[in-house]
Image (cartoon, grey):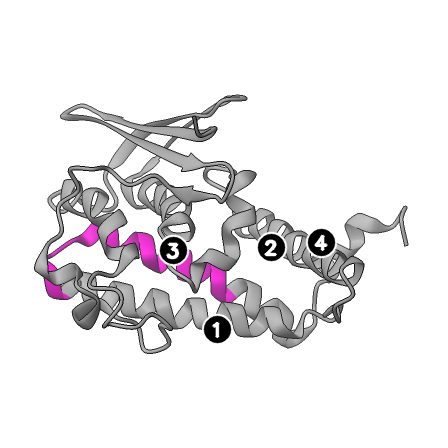
């Protein structure tokens, strides 16, 4: 039996209560697909494909990311993105709770689903899923991303490969993610008026832009000062 990482996102407001359960295979950090999953025409790879997507249309009929986010998009398509909700996130080790707007909650949920969806571009962020922090702010996200990437370089070095200690390749990873986020937001607008879903992707892209900005300017002083006792 597969060992699962399970997160439950429960949205509460006066007129709505909805639970999304995210089941992830802990061995490969891949989302467990629902057997009864709908496969709408708009989710086909030839219609949803990002400009930098490496997947072959002959081998992949559907975009894996589109298939995995469709339930979230469709449920919230009539819900204003700025509507206030109470969100409870239940994980195996602890429970998180926050009163916020719909787009912030959807962004947090999609930030868990998208890297584990089977998308090869976002799959590079899978290690973050193991230590998912709901409602993380930009500074927390930067810290997690830089730590993840530098730990990966340590493992590369141990395995006889050339590490990228200056994080030059991380910039390219996040430029690819920005291209993907912009494409996903555009494709969502072509399907239906999904305000919350679009804005959630915009929020995720703001986080990606923050990471690339820090790398482009080489200004990580706001993080470096945390390490005064170690450097």
Question: Could you tell me which residue is drawn at 41 percent across and 48 percent down?
Answer: 116
- Specify few, some or many for label 3: CA neighbours under 10 Å numbering under 14, 14-19, or 20 or more: some
Give the mark toward the camera: 3 or 1.
Answer: 1
- Which quadrant of the figure contains the C terminus? bottom right
N-terminal of the pair, mark 3 or mark 4, is: 4
Image marks 4 and 1: residues in contact by CB distance under 8 Å: no
**Of the image marks 2 and 3, the number of the one nearer the N terminus:** 2
Badge 2 is on which residue? Answer: 145
Whole-percent x, y for residue 69 in the image:
26, 49
Instruction: Give the residue pinned by disc 4.
Output: 151
Near-viewer residue (114 or 178) = 114
Earlier sequence position, callout 3 versus callout 1: 1
Nearest the viewer among 231 and 114 is 114
Residue 28's x, y, as percent? Answer: 49, 44
Separation (CA) of disc 4 from disc 1: 20 Å
Whole-Å distance between the Cαs marked 2 and 3?
Answer: 16 Å
Determine if the magenta segment contains residue 155: no
Q: Mark 3 points at which residue?
A: 203
Label 3: state its secondary structure: helix
Mark 2 vs 1, N-terminal side: 2
| Tag of residue 38 | none
């Amino acid at each position: 039996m597969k060992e699962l990482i399970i997160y439950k996102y429960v949205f509460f407001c006066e007129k709505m209560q909805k639970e999304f359960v995210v089941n992830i295979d802990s061995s490969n950090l891949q989302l467990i697909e629902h057997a009864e999953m709908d496969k709408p025409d708009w989710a086909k790879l030839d219609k949803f494909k990002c400009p930098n997507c490496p997947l072959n249309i002959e081998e992949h009929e559907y975009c894996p990311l589109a298939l995995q986010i469709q339930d979230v998009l469709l449920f919230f398509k009539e819900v204003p993105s700025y509507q206030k909700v109470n969100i409870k996130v239940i994980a195996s080790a602890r429970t998180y709770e926050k009163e916020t707007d719909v787009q912030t909650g959807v962004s947090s949920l999609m930030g868990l689903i998208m890297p584990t969806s089977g998308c090869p571009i976002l799959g590079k962020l899978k290690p973050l899923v193991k230590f998912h922090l709901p409602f993380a702010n930009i500074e927390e996200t930067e810290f997690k991303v830089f730590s993840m990437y530098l730990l990966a370089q340590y493992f590369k070095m141990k395995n006889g490969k050339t590490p990228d200690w200056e994080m030059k390749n991380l910039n390219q990873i996040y430029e690819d993610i920005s291209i993907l986020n912009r494409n996903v937001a555009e494709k969502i607008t072509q399907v239906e008026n999904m305000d919350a879903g679009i804005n959630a992707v915009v929020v995720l892209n703001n986080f990606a832009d923050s990471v690339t900005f820090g790398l482009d300017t080489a200004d990580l002083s706001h993080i470096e000062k945390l390490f005064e006792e170690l450097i």
